[in-house]
Amino acid sequence: MEFSGTLVLAVLILTLLWLLSLKSCRQYCLPPGPPALPIIGNLLQLDKRAPFKTLLKLSETYGPVITVYLGPKRAVVLVGYDAVKEALVDQGDDFTGRGQLPLMVKATKGYGLGISNGDRWRQLRRFTLTTLRDFGMGRKGMEEWIQEESKHLIARINSTKAAPFDPTYFLSSTVSNVICCLVFGQRFSYDDEHFLSILQIISDLPRFGSRPGGQLYNIFPRLMELLPGQHHNFFAKVEELRGFTMKKIQEHHNTLDPSCPRDYIDCFLTKLNQEKHIPTTEFHYENLVSTVLNLFLAGTETTSSTLRFAINVLVRYPKIQENIQQEIDTVIGRDRCPLMEDRKSLSFTDAVIHEIHRFMDIVPMNVPHHALEDISFRGYTIPKDTIIIPLLHSVLKEEKHWETPWSFNPQHFLDQNGNFKKNPAFLPFSAGKRSCVGESLARMEIFIFLVSLLQQFTFSCTGGPDSIDLSPEYSSFANLPRRYHVIATPRC
């Protein structure tokens, strides 16, 4: 009875706090939204498997700027290209804040580029962009690295001898080796068991974030810490990744030559030593560990998942695959490695790659933003500390910008003459000052790897094209493609 009374009292106190927070919000002109319950907010209304679909549906009633409550946390959702572009680009300075997702905060210990704000974010982003560009990101040097890595991938796929295989870890190894060259200054063998175990962890993390347990942790972190569950296993895996990262940093520290930096870690360590006497510097050990972790995770999983989805698309639509191969044979042939400059002559191939990004919709709810101060937007006030969700799903599937938004259609990116055409609503990497740091690298990898593969192989599966389901296996935070065993038949 005593426990029951305590529970009732706790609920009453939480309800009172909820009502007080609602009263304090009346001073603001908040965007409209559905009625919310105490403590749990609008959670019962959301599709737990695909909450972005519920948010899109709510916008039909409440408009393109809506207020919802994710548990006790207030969130403002921006729906459609016009609202997202107006916020992230036209009012970019107001919307630079990054949401503090509890899973990410604990995983990074609150440090690093991914979730930082203010001066920390400005220092780390400027340094990271400059350093990665110095090591070739988006330039000729990086192109050669990717071409070389594509040869390893082709050799490994050749070893399957046209038998069914799961391409997941081949693609993860290939993509991860590119970011490893930039960050760690080395690549790893596809047979390196420790490397493969790290890739398995990287593959598992976004899946947990898209499951109910991961979503609940982000909404009720203190409560979830007290309960048993998979989130404890999640953080144990994160610690393994941190250990791997710290070991690499220590190896770099032991062999550092400031006059001849080998990679991102060397450059950061040099900067750390230069600014160690500056009290306000953000170049310290914890930011180094977490930023390297950010780059390693983001640079591996999103691009490899996109390539895996691309192969699923090619198997599902063999005629599209055939048309790409004919275009590649005409423009490049089968003997020369593809170059980024070939892209302008491969209009259909480029259109298919863009449509793969659009249709996959890999981060449908974007990485949440955060109101660092009160924001005036479209006649409303978004109060300080509000979560802001620029709904990329609504941009990539908006009917007024895409002729057939719910179908895979490369014609979205082709004009009447078959030439490639841009679409302003193509925002898979987000937009504005918090857009993806590695966008140029990801675009280069996907183009070179995919063209290289189609020069050498035709992809199919034993169940035939109709057995491929392009809907995501996991959804919510990330739309992750289904896994299939495919057949890579060498082209004669």
Image (spheres, rainbow, N blue to C red):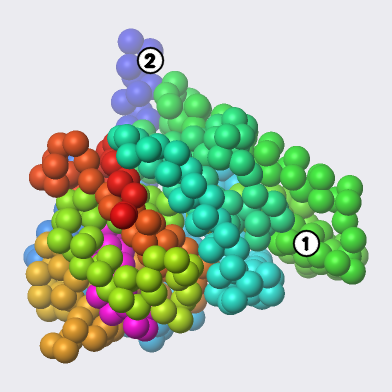
User: What count of labels does the image hold?
Assistant: 2
Above or below, 315 relative to 66: above
Mostly what secondary structure, the magenta segment? helix
Asked if residue 188 can be seen in this view, the reply is yes
Task: Judge by depth and name the residue closer to the eye, 59 or 364.
Answer: 364
Asked if residue 111 can be seen in this view, the reply is no
Residues at marks 2 and 1, CA–CA distance in whole angstroms: 60 Å
- Judge from the rendering whether residue 241 lies leftward or rightward of residue 68; answer left or right: right
**Disc 2 target residue:** 3
Q: Residue furthest top?
A: 1
The location of residue 41, given as percent across then percent down, is: 26, 47
- Judge from the rendering whether residue 131 lies leftward or rightward of residue 99; answer left or right: right
Name the front one of labels 2 and 1.
Answer: 1
Task: Judge by depth and name the residue closer to the eye, 410 or 78.
Answer: 410
The location of residue 468, given as percent across then percent down, is: 17, 44
- Judge from the rendering whether residue 344 lies leftward or rightward of residue 67; answer left or right: right
**Please, what is the three-letter code of the amino acid marked with disc 2?**
Phe
**Disc 1 target residue:** 262
- Judge from the rendering whether residue 280 lies leftward or rightward of residue 113; answer left or right: right
The residue depicted at 21 percent of the width and 62 percent of the height is 322
Q: Which residues are magenta?
A: 343-361
